[in-house]
Amino acid sequence: MIEARRVSGALGAEITGVDLSRPLSQAAFAELKRLWLEHLVVFFRGQALTPAQFMAFAEQFGEPVEYPLVKGLDDFPKIIEVRKLEHERIAFGGIWHTDTAYLERPPMASMLVAREVPPFGGDTLFANMYLSFDSLSIALKTLLESLRAVNTSTKADASKTREDAIKVSGKQARDYVAEHPVVRTHPETGRKALYVNSGHTVRFAGWTEEESAPLLKYLYEVQTRPEFTCRFSWQPGSIALWDNRCAQHNAVNDYHGYRRVMHRITLAGDVPA
Ligand code: SIN
């Protein structure tokens, strides 16, 4: 029987009672989807899926797509390895962000399976973008709903977190830029969520970077208030599946000298509206 245990007041639930190495029944899939939409990120333990099983699980949820900046595995180009080795100092994704918001159609969801984890640390933080939007005053909500924001793949802090991954398996990629609404309506739940992030957003459309900076800084602070977040501690075989339309994440880089290896799949999304 599928059961969900919430991991924080804001978002995130650990799911038990399902074996992801086998195709899900229609009822099991429907229940997982319902729980995922409710909790924004769901976690599973002890699911050491092979790349083929991981891909098969992903395909039940959506359409896997290639990550634009890093090459995938030889046999599975839509699975990338998120890896930090003993001598490396940079953690891929070690900044608050929603995945590839610089694409015209950013991914609906992403999933990670842990292959090797450090003896401590290396957790991932998640934040609920519905709650941060809901917490704002009506006046600020009204202003934000009238704005769009410019997102790029070249913002320095986010680019830094990909340096090692790109050195090892970077793709010949161009710089990406996309403009999206600052507040998006989730196409499945109908709820409104903040859709700017410190990893990729550079300014509001029609505003200069200088004019945008104070308000963006305020929004980043609200988005990551502890009461809007959860934290997941990995074990080999743990899986996280998160909704990029209403959640952000941040890989905590606190395990220098140890190795952490994950496999990651992203699922195609729609144009934010
Ligand atoms: C990512 O941003 O996809 C990486 C997250 C992680 O490694 O925990």
Image (cartoon, rainbow, N blue to C red):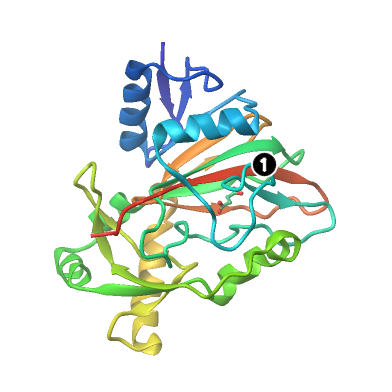
User: Residue drawn 75% across and 60% down?
Assistant: 168
**Residue drawn at the location 71% of the way across and 59% of the way down:** 169
Tag count in the figure? 1
Residue 46, quarter of the rendered image: top right
Report the front residue among 53 and 90: 53
Of 96 and 34, which appears nearest the observer?
A: 34
Q: Which residue is mark 1?
A: 75
Give x and y (percent) for residue 77. Answer: 61, 48
Q: Is residue 36 above or below residue 203?
A: above
Left or right: where does residue 132 sit relative to residue 137?
right
Q: Is residue 258 left or right of residue 96?
A: right
Q: Split into 4 quadrants, where in the image is the C terminus?
A: bottom left
Residue at the image point whose x is 31% and y is 35% from the top = 38
Residue 158 visible in the picture: yes
Residue 193, compared with residue 122, is above or below; it is below
Whole-percent x and y of residue 194? 30, 60
